[in-house]
């Protein structure tokens, strides 16, 4: 929870001077996108299974500091903690720790550290480390070093945790002392990357300081009088050959360190504060009436900012850059959960996430051919650099809805920004190539319905089924959007249309086939119950015996064979209920209520992706208490460790779901083909809430209190939307309106 990151570097919140028994803590530093590869071995093989696993590496720990007083190491094995405090400041972007130690003989020393990972400098982190002699005068030694002998966490019985690698993942390539510190270069065994890790250090505060090289670092010695403080500033840089040519890795480490030393820690801290001031001015969600929820919301937003790649080459992993859970893989979590938060808060980051998908098109085309599609592109279910890394295909590769999820995010981006230049340059090719898969996988049945068979929807407790409602409905959206993009390109950007159509070999007959498939799509519906059936077989299955399932048997996936789960009527997470949100205009409110009532009873919420969606739909259908309870489960999931696995990394999708719960849930925000609308409600325990959204070229502030809802146009020329169905128009001449609550 105290991890720091900047979208590239991720440092777990472990102490700089950690000591103790091996295994007493989980150390970790990660670089977004920097990974190793390993062959996936199957005892029983089959054609088309994923062959290569990509997994995020634990890179050298450059935080290391060691303090000795009169030759005695300060740490748990030799001293007693008198006082201790640690805090992470979301406005400053600095992790602060103060600890007072008592050594043998009663000597007391205070250590204060401030750590940051620079938002404005991709490759740089820094530490300010202050040691004060409180009640003695003695010889003090501080060693600042790099621990390059790191390993990854071992996978256990939990499929959500760890990797299969054993032993050191990085091979030493060289070391260079610089006079201020050291630069260590290492290489991966299989993926072919070179990594440079460097530190540069400076000491101050005492008149006579002796500096010298030590093992993989720099040491400082001084004799302190009582009350004196020795301060060491440690600057850290990580650069890999994913970012620059191999011969440029070490020079870039050196130049980044030189610049950081020259500017100093205070300047880096000021840059950090300025970056975050700009972020919070756009993204902050204010809640009055529940301090714990307010903390949870801001904690989640801050971690999302720390974890998201913004260079067009990286994405956001399921655990961000805070831990090794899910091996650092990117999932659909990005497009459906995380993307909207950045689209409406920092749209330039959202655009970079889409550019990552564009960069992955060649690999997606390769995967489509492996899956026997003669044309089109199929995005991997879990990946880092584009390879399909899911070794369990029923809950991985079978989730074809990933294609529609990517297309959905592009559609939402276009509606929010109007950036058709992006569509012409990048987005159209993604949408059109991925749309082809639906007519490749689907077919018409004897009744003339277009069916999509043998797929898995969002619910991973129901696998390889026919006509999963979510998949079919999203495929229909996808093909219709692809056809509309083709039409618009043809009429507005004919040269771009010719370029794209020629590049992928697209003709009018294929576009017509998409429209026909949409018109004839099978969307399972049970007339007797009045609900949308999750798939063709879901209602025919035996209901799960929830009454006789002990609490310790959740999550079910850790206690029952997959086939046992698949044979039952039970959901891990929102599936049909998610479709109610994403395709909101296609359902009547009574349909949504009946679907919610039915699927709530059969859903375990074993996935952290589930509660936020149920909260949003509960708010929409008028179940205010349930909406609030589900929101509570989402907002503090990691702060309270409610899924008992936060130690392996935070849950980025659930974190983004917190923002969705405020904007989409309580404020009733929807952006569809019919335009932007709000239907705000105020939770009973709150006095007020407020948030801001970038949309249609403006920045809109929404404030909801007991009396009314205020809409303020903070920048932009004009904006039109609806409030509980009533039209609202804001402009520079009239930037604010207050609308009565419903």
Image: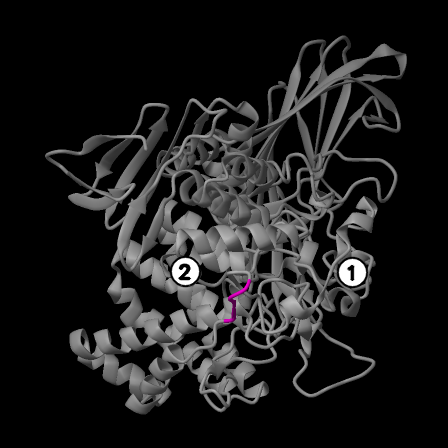
Look at the image and tell me in which quarter the C terminus lies. Answer: top left
**Residue annotated with mark 2:** 583
Residue on which the image places disc 1: 168
Local crowd at mark 2 within 10 Å, few (<14), some, or many (≥20)? some
Drawn side of residue 730 relative to residue 251, left or right: left
Residues at discs 1 and 2 in contact (Cβ within 8 Å): no
Residue 120 visible in the current orientation: no
Q: Is residue 527 magenta?
A: yes
Q: Residue 605, position in %: x, y?
A: 65, 50
Q: Is residue 419 above or below residue 590?
A: below
Earlier-in-chain disc, 1 versus 2: 1
Q: Measured from the top left, where is residue 271 in percent x and y?
A: 42, 35
Q: Nearer the viewer, residue 604 or 108?
A: 604
Q: Horizontally, is 241 left or right of 695 in the view?
A: right
Residue at 51% x, 41% y is 658
Tell me the quarter of the picture where residue 108 sits.
top right
Residue at 81 percent of width and 83 percent of height: 44
Please tell me whether mark 1 sits on a helix, a strand or a loop.
loop
Q: Main secondary structure of the magenta part?
A: loop
Alpha carbons under labels 1 and 2: distance apart: 47 Å
**x, y percent for residue 506:** 33, 88
Closer mark to the observer between disc 1 and disc 2:
2
Q: Residues within 10 Å of mark 1 (few under 14, many from 20)?
A: some
Between residue 417 and residue 122, name the one nearer to us. 417
Q: Residue furthest left?
A: 733
Q: Which residues are magenta?
A: 524-528
Q: Quadrant of the N terminus?
A: top right
Q: Does dot 2 land on a helix, a strand or a loop?
A: loop
């Amino acid at each position: 929870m105290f991890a720091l990151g900047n979208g590239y570097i991720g440092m777990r919140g472990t102490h700089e001077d950690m000591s103790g028994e091996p295994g007493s803590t989980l150390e970790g530093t990660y670089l977004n996108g920097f990974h190793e590869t390993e062959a996936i071995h199957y005892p029983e093989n089959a054609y088309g299974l994923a062959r290569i696993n990509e997994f995020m590496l634990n890179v050298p720990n450059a935080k290391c500091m060691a303090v000795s007083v009169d030759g005695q190491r300060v740490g748990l094995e030799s001293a007693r903690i008198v006082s201790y405090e640690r805090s992470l400041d979301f406005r400053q972007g600095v992790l602060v720790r103060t600890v007072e130690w008592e050594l043998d003989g009663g000597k007391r020393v205070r250590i204060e550290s401030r750590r940051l990972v620079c938002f404005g400098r991709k490759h740089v982190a820094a530490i300010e480390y202050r040691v004060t002699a409180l009640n003695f005068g003695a010889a003090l030694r501080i060693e600042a070093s790099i621990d390059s002998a790191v390993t990854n966490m071992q996978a256990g019985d939990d499929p959500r945790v760890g990797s299969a690698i054993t032993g050191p993942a990085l091979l030493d390539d060289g070391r260079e002392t610089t006079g201020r510190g050291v630069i260590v270069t290492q290489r991966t065994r299989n993926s072919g990357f070179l990594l440079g890790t460097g530190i540069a250090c400076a000491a101050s505060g005492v008149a006579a300081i002796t500096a010298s090289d030590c093992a993989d670092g720099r040491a400082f010695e001084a004799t302190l009088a009582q009350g004196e403080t020795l301060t060491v500033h440690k600057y850290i840089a990580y650069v890999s050959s994913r970012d620059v040519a191999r011969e440029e890795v070490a020079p870039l480490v050196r130049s980044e360190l030189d610049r950081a030393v020259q500017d100093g820690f205070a300047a880096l801290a000021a840059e950090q504060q300025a970056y975050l001031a700009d972020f919070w001015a756009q993204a902050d969600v204010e809640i009055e009436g529940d301090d714990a929820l307010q903390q949870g919301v801001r904690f989640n937003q801050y971690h999302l900012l720390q974890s998201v790649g913004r260079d067009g080459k990286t994405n956001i992993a399921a655990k961000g850059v805070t831990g090794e859970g899910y091996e650092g893989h990117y999932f659909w979590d990005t497009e459906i959960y995380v993307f909207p938060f950045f689209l409406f808060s920092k749209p330039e980051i959202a655009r970079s996430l889409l550019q990552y998908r564009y960069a992955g098109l060649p690999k997606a085309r390769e995967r489509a051919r492996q899956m026997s599609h003669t044309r089109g592109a199929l995005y991997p279910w879990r990946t880092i650099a584009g390879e399909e890394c899911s070794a369990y295909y029923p809950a991985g590769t079978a989730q074809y809805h990933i294609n529609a999820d990517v297309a959905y995010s592009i559609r939402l981006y276009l509606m929010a920004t109007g950036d058709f230049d992006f569509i012409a340059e990048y987005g159209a090719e993604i949408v059109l190539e991925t749309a082809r898969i639906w007519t490749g996988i689907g077919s018409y049945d004897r009744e003339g319905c277009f069916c999509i068979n043998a797929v898995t929807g969002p619910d991973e407790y129901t696998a390889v089924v026919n006509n999963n409602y979510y998949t079919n409905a999203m495929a229909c959206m996808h093909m219709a959007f692809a056809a509309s993009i083709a039409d618009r390109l043809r009429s507005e950007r004919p040269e771009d249309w010719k370029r794209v159509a020629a590049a992928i070999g697209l003709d009018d007959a294929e576009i017509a086939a998409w429209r026909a498939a949409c018109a004839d799509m099978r969307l399972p519906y049970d007339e007797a119950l009045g609900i949308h059936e999750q798939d063709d077989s879901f209602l025919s299955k035996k209901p799960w015996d929830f009454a006789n399932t002990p609490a310790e048997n959740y999550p079910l996936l850790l206690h029952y064979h997959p086939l046992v789960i698949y044979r039952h009527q039970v959901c891990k997470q929102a599936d049909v209920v998610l479709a109610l949100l994403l395709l909101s205009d296609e359902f009547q409110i009574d349909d949504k209520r009946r679907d919610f009532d039915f699927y709530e009873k059969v859903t375990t919420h074993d996935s952290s992706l589930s509660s936020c969606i149920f909260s949003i739909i509960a708010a929409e259908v008028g179940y205010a208490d349930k909406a609030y309870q589900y929101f509570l489960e989402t907002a503090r999931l990691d702060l309270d460790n409610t899924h008992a696995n936060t130690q392996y990394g935070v849950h980025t999708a659930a974190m983004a779901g917190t923002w969705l719960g405020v904007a989409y849930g309580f404020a009733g925000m929807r952006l569809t083909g019919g335009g932007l609308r709000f239907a705000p409600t105020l939770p009973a325990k709150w006095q007020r809430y407020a948030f801001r959204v970038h949309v249609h070229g403006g920045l809109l502030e929404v404030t909801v209190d007991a009396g009314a809802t205020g809409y303020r146009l903070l920048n932009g020329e004009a904006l039109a939307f609806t409030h509980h169905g009533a039209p609202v128009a804001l402009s520079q001449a009239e930037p604010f309106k207050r609308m009565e609550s419903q």
